[in-house]
Image: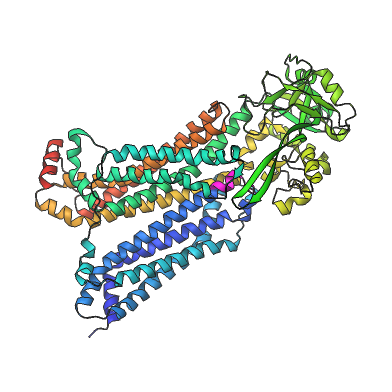
Amino acid sequence: MKSLSNVFTTLREKSRGQYLLLFGCLFFSVLLITAYCLMMRSPTVLNVLPVGGDSRKQVMMIFVLAVIGCGAFTLYAAGLFFRHKSREMGVFLALGASRRILARQLRREVGLISVLACAVGMVLGTPLAWLVWSIFRLTLMDTPEMALLFDFRAYAIPAAFSVFVIVALLVMLARFFRRVNILDIISETHRAEPIRAVPRWFGAVGIALVVLGALLGYFVPSFCVLQLHWYPPEGLTAIFYLPALIGLYMLLLHTVVNGWKKGKSRYSHLIATGMMQFQGRQTVRNMLVITVLVAGAYFAAFYSPMLATTAQLGIAERTEDYAFFYPTGVNMPDQTEIERLAEQNDVTIKEYRCQESAMLAVDGELHVETESSVGITYTKEYQPMLESGRFFSESSWNALTGDSLDLAPGEVAGVFNFEGYGGGIFDNDISLITNPVTKQTLSVIPSETILKNDTLFSCRVLDDEDYAAITQGLTGAWRAEQVLFHADNDSYAFAKSLFNEIVDRANEDMAVISAYDPVRRDLYHARGDEYFADPENADKFDIPVIDYAQPDSSAFRQNWMYMPQFRILDQADFATNMAVFLLLFIFVAILCFTAVGVILFTRSMTLAITNAWVYADLRKLGASNAYLRQTARGQISRVFKAPIVVGTLLIFGFYTLILYGNGEGGITPSEWASLGSCLFVVAAVSVLLYALYRVTLRSAYKELGCLKSERINSFDSKKRSILFL
């Protein structure tokens, strides 16, 4: 006579597929989260992502979506496992087996599987992250700073997720054995999760709520900051996205229950629709998870093409091949030295120009923050010397650019980018200019003339007499030389040599980040506050350090205030300078799309296997293999198409909204070009997802035994649908 343990062992061998499914889902979820956390918390990445920057927030947001998706996926897999075991446990209970002994035996199995799957996932997450990153380095780009370093404190997050999963499984197991009615347990495997009739207006209302939620979620935080002068706590404004989540659920409900077919064509899908309704609740939940993951994956996938397109267009639109500036008095290469260096590289210098600019203080409103019980609020205080700005005289501007600008006394013109926008970081709304040395002031009014020049972006221009008067007594530390020139037969070697020469001659006072502002620094010190951009506060405020020994690092290239703008150098080194940014978001996108693929395949195959007996009955009623394939395709196509299409449109529309909100006059031409590059990403990913869809269909056909090709016309299809329903 066999013991209960031997019986469980035999049943486990017979149900190997269900055990492997549970193990695989747990393993994959923990593997994904571990690899993500190791990458997200890697010093290699954190040294590049600015603290509080949008890129770091985006990575965290996608991570939260991935955790939610993986958590829902593992609970779904556990639910399938317990549904499969319900019949076995019900038979044991009917034969008089002790509920306590059965629970202990199954708890041992579930505990062993979950602990082993989570442990293996955490262990293999490290080599997975290293392998994917190494492949990127070998195939795409490789720089010394891309050497991947791990902070093993990142294991705390996947460990916490593993504990959550194990506890959740044990709680589900306890609920599973808490049932009293044995017949209910036995019939669990055939129990459906039907959805009641859903009005057709659910679709339209769902779309409206999605749009409303996206608008509220995006604009409410800005309203709180700009109108209420209140910085809401992190995550509080996320509640305004709830209408979008509710609308998304309604939209998917309508898709599963009613579909989007109208007229007579809807009758050809009655069987597929009926089966979807009987598996509706779980199907909609899975589709909701897939939609969120698709949106998160595309959010990461769009980062690289948008960044690359905008940057390359900006570089191409520069009016100068070479541009750099430096404080007056620093021994930088002059025209003779540059021409000698160019001659050594067979390059010809053309239209060399060098003009003086001045650093002056401008007025504005300082945001004074106050902590309170409801968060951080701020008030605006007018400051006659708020920050510094670079100024040219109109004659210097004309000599540099070839313009014929003629400003009236008291006018100031601002220099915007080549599209005429300030990018949210520059405007010309000033009324007072102050000499930071003599404290002499000059009242000005903004000129209606809009100057466009990417090379001299964020500078300002004054009338010659005003410039001479306001800069009188200004010391060399507050003056700078601006150099511009073109090059014939340009070469990367020349650009790199000149760049290295500039770095070698830079002094310690120039070792500051681009956000450093001496006027704002003095203002903070006068108020008794620390200034975040002071080099000595780099560790405290986690800001990049300008190290002249590493001029090719992304931290140096992206943050040095005096970084030269050399067209050929910037075009060639763009990918290298932004390597960590680009590869991080590509890595995140690949992981999320992998999760989407696994969930889509698993859910589709579950639908096919669960409804296998229905297909068997249809075959007995005379349904052909072609009709069975059509029915299976009707189910699986909804699982694939609805969440993928909705998730793609949702995030593409949200990206468009972000670009529209960031612009000062709508979406700029370069941003339209960026959106176009995102469409190429969508097309490429869609091809891969369609290939997965075809593989899933074939696997489902094989499982249902209807691979053999048979023709069926649309009339027979509709007639059989009505008959079988």
Q: Residue furthest front?
A: 373
Q: For this view, does 81 lie left or right of residue 458? A: left
Q: How many marks?
A: 0
Image coordinates for residue 515, horizontal then vertical, percent: 72, 40
Residue at (19, 50) in percent of width and height: 706
Q: Residue furthest right?
A: 473
51 inside magenta stretch:
yes
**Residue 552 occupies quadrant:** top right
Looking at the picture, does residue 559 appear above or below residue 669? below
**Residue 521 occupies quadrant:** top right
Q: Residue furthest bottom?
A: 1
> Is any atom of residue 324 visible in this view?
yes
Instruction: Give the quadrant of the N terminus.
Output: bottom left
Residue at (13, 54) in percent of width and height: 617
Residue at (81, 44) in percent of width and height: 526
> Is any atom of residue 553 visible in this view?
no
Q: For this view, does 80 lie left or right of residue 420? A: left
Looking at the picture, does residue 612 appear above or below residue 169? above
Q: Nearer the viewer, residue 634 or 182?
A: 182
Q: For this view, does 288 lie left or right of residue 322? A: left
Image coordinates for residue 490, horizontal then vertical, percent: 69, 27
| Residues shaded magenta | 47-58
Q: Nearer the viewer, residue 227 or 69?
A: 227
Looking at the picture, does residue 10 appear above or below residue 605? below
Image coordinates for residue 327, horizontal then vertical, percent: 83, 34
Image coordinates for residue 84, horizontal then vertical, percent: 27, 65
381 inside magenta stretch:
no
